[in-house]
Amino acid sequence: MKLVEKKAEISVEALLSAGHALVLFDPRSPVSALPLEPAGAAAPKRRQDAAAPAGFDIRHALAQLLKRKGKPESDLAKAPQALDVGGSRLVFLAVDAEAATFERHTLIRKALALVLEETPEKLVVAALGGAAWRDRICADAVYVAAVNAEALPSRKRGPAAPPLKQLILYGSSARAALDHALAAAEGNRLTRSLAALPPNELSPGSYRKRIKTLAKAYGWKVSEHDFPALKKMGAGAFCAVAQGSPAQDAAIVRVEYDGRGAKGKAAAMALVGKGICFDTGGHNLKPARYMHGMHEDMTGSAVVLGILAAAARLKLPLRLTGWLALAENHISPLAYRQNEVVAALNGTTIEIVHTDAEGRMVLADALHLAAREKPQLICDFATLTGSMHYALGSRMSGVFATSSALAHAASRAGTASGERIVVFPQPEDYDAALESTVADVKQCTLEGEADHILATRFLGRFVGDTPWLHMDLSAHNCKGGLG
């Protein structure tokens, strides 16, 4: 999507001939005060093919539309309204710049849906308001449009809907904010596009090839620990899961983005992602209802790649290292079983209790590899536990951290970016449930109670003293979207 910036406010002539337009304005301004003067004799000469009649009053037409529907003007701050004028569709929405980011994004997404449903190749967005208001709202509009401008991968036959090719932004301001919005949207689309791929197109082996292709595009460095190497290294937790796949194409992939040009080997931040390309549950086989959609069990790894892509696009002065634990959890004669005892890479022995708790197994060794490089911070992302989904549903995700300051920094980041997250505790006394008589720790319990907390307590054994943030992605897939 190409972004065309126009600093000036849109003229009524440009709006009436836009084809598809979204008009955003400050709710503190009444419709009658919008800078959209009627197109009259004093107006510039209009194109002969413009569909709206000369002298057309947009403000009056919008007021009449609201009156016909029995809606007050204040309703424009709650729901968008579409006005079809000749050959153009104009959608109006009042957006409070002080509202939460999630709420702003959600409203703009609903407004954009009214024009994107017609699959335009060009879209005009007009921001009518003061400079401070436009700084925030223009970035919101660009982000939401860029996120929704392209369809996710599909193998459905027939012509695909054309993507949005051009976004013309009137009232543009704060270029840095627009660049950030475009980069964040690019990372968002990459993450969702990878997660949408069917499992026959995204096996661990093909995923590894895609990562190398992405690395060339974004300037990342890539190295791999494949299954034979991990087995030789003693990564028993990861290999216990990976050994069930006949393809033997599992690997822990290291992806590095260095925007600092820094010397030295220590990474400033490590990002670890669960990349289970399909999860059958292993010998503790999932029923069909819960196995459906398990090609998305690699979303944590896709989140890491999305972050790296956004950082590279913005050329952020950071050094980020991604660790992607790529495998499949198969049922086979070689698959790991309940009651086995395996040794993780850091020497911790683990009693296997449930083979469908494979995510914490592959993350254990990936976290240890990340921690060995002594980063300043480790963040991991994983579609990890059903109990987090039961706790929050699919509209929010949960986070845990090794300190209150880090947890609340994550909470503030979520609020700022429009991703709703909830901070959970991880008290030490929960460790009692993971005590084993035959190993250092149980993988999980069969009771299932507070498994999101128990999984965090388990994973904490593999990060050492490194500050650590763990996100359980219960909201990785939400009908209607997260805004």
Image (cartoon, rainbow, N blue to C red):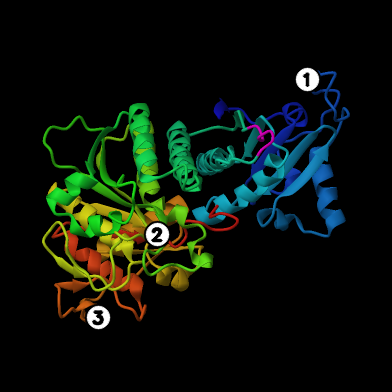
User: Do callouts 2 and 3 mark residues in contact (Cβ within 8 Å)?
Assistant: no
Residue 319 position by quadrant: top left
Q: Secondary structure at mark 1?
A: loop
Per the image, the residue denoted by label 1 is 44
Count the marks: how many? Answer: 3
Which amino acid type corresponds to the residue marked 2 in the rendered image? Thr
Name the disc covering residue 420, or none. none
Relative to 220, say whether 447 is above or below: below
Left or right: 412, with 155 as reference point: left
Q: Residue at x 75, y 39 (%)?
A: 90
Question: The disc labelled 3 sits on which kind of residue?
Answer: Ala
Q: Real-space Cα distance between discs 1 and 2? A: 57 Å
Q: Which residues are magenta?
A: 157-162
Q: Are marks 1 and 2 in contact (CB under 8 Å)?
A: no
Asked if disc 3 and disc 1 are in contact, CB closer than 8 Å, the reply is no
Task: Identify the residue position indicated by label 3 in the image.
Answer: 433
Give the main secondary structure, helix, strand or loop, of the magenta stretch: loop
Q: CA distance from mark 3 to mark 1?
A: 76 Å
Residue 55 percent location from the top left of the image: 87, 30
